[in-house]
Amino acid sequence: MFNNIAFDIVIGLIFIYLLYSLFATVLSELLATWVGLRARNLKEGIDRMLNDEDETKHSILYRIIDSFKLLKNPDNLRVRNFYNHPEIKYLGSTGVFKVPSSFKSISFSKTIIYLLSGEGAANKVRIEDKLKKLVARDETLSPEENIFDTETAKYVLSLWNDSYGDVVKFKIRLEAWFDRTMEQATEWYKRKIQIVLLVLGFLMAWFFNADTFTIIGKLSTDKAARAQMVNLASAYITAHPEAPAAQRTTDSPSVNVGQNLSVRHDSLLAVKRQLEADINNANSLLGSGAWLPDSVFITTDKATGVKAFSPALDETTFLNIHQSSIVADGYYPVTREEKWRYFFRLLLSHFFGFLVTAIAISLGAPFWFDLLNKLMKLRTSAKQDTNSTEAYRRDNSVSPLNREG
């Protein structure tokens, strides 16, 4: 039942999705590192904790647009005062990544208590007095002392009241507040990465000419390509018996402070190179690729009159953009203008196929790995059951291997 054409097509398609998902994940991690996306996301969370929400930004349209702003970098006096405190400032590097991408809840509570109490040991009288002034919007407070917006100050004052004036209990409640906010900040980060994966997935599908519908058609008609794709999937599962490491997109922005970014960067580049090789192997079977070479070799089957192109490409699109009429077999040069025309015509003719591929890629590598692993086990077990003597025993029949006469 499981060792049939349809099943092998599904395996081949899922394997393609897995490779592209892994590649998109690596690219998204590199991109997130280069632009400091974690640090920006953490800063956005701190901004939400210190400042009240702008009442003028409650419209649905604004919220939709705001959801697609991936590179937010809040810059206001309260956030600057918080990040300039030595407890936070020195967690960042002196280079490009000046703003820390993560810190512990204890650093948050120590900074807030210092900003409320001032220098020296934490003083509960000064803390309570400062919070009451913030709630009352006391004009005697300087801009630097105005560390909380009004509604936030009311909430922090309630935390202080719940602590009954005990600084240690207040510190614990501040840390719990930070942890709860960071849990939500993790969800914000996941959504941002989901958008990044969708965009990267579409660009990859376009660049590699990975139209889901075209891939299905190729695997349906090309027995050799289908068999080799299944073999590649089987070899991959054998070489990687465990699921890919959990995506760092699920990591909280408040952890992994001491991670060596340069080491991780080099590791990601190594994985990227390996994935590029695997994708090229798969694409050579499927005839994918959106960028044409300098020349294309064309042969014609004398019996059927069908033309074959090497390397494989989208024949209809190529014949539409090629300036010279193809009348004989041989090499046909491709100009740079034709390459660009072919590249953009692919987008027009395969847009929805690319979109389906992009949506599949955005589901993530772990999803496709688990699914592929289960299907390969089903395929293997079904084949073994069919060819084993146990199948005869279950049917209460005699195995041909044990038959006499």
Image: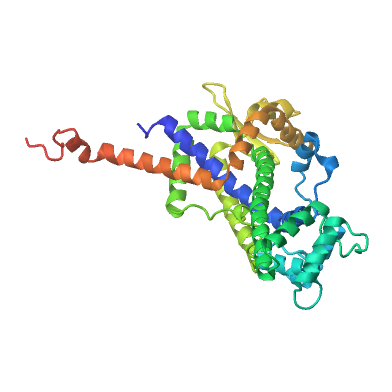
Left or right relative to 398: residue 217: right
Whether residue 141 appears in this view of the structure is yes
Query: Residue drawn 66% across and 26% down?
Result: 316
When asked about the image quadrant of residue 59, the answer is: top right
Pick out the residue farthest to the left. 405
Residue occupying the far bottom of the picture? 120
Quadrant (top left/top right/bottom left/bottom right) for the C terminus: top left
Please tell me which residue lies in front, 87 or 73. Answer: 87
Q: Is residue 220 left or right of residue 342?
A: left
Rendering coords of residue 20 (x, y %): 59, 44
Most foreground residue, 209 or 332: 209
**Residue 314, position as x, y percentages in the image:** 64, 31
Give the image location of residue 321, x and y in percent.
Answer: 74, 28
Task: Look at the image and tell me whether residue 335 can be seen.
Answer: no
Q: Quadrant of the N terminus?
A: top left
Q: Is residue 98 above or below residue 361?
A: below
Image quadrant of residue 171?
bottom right
Colour scheme shown: rainbow
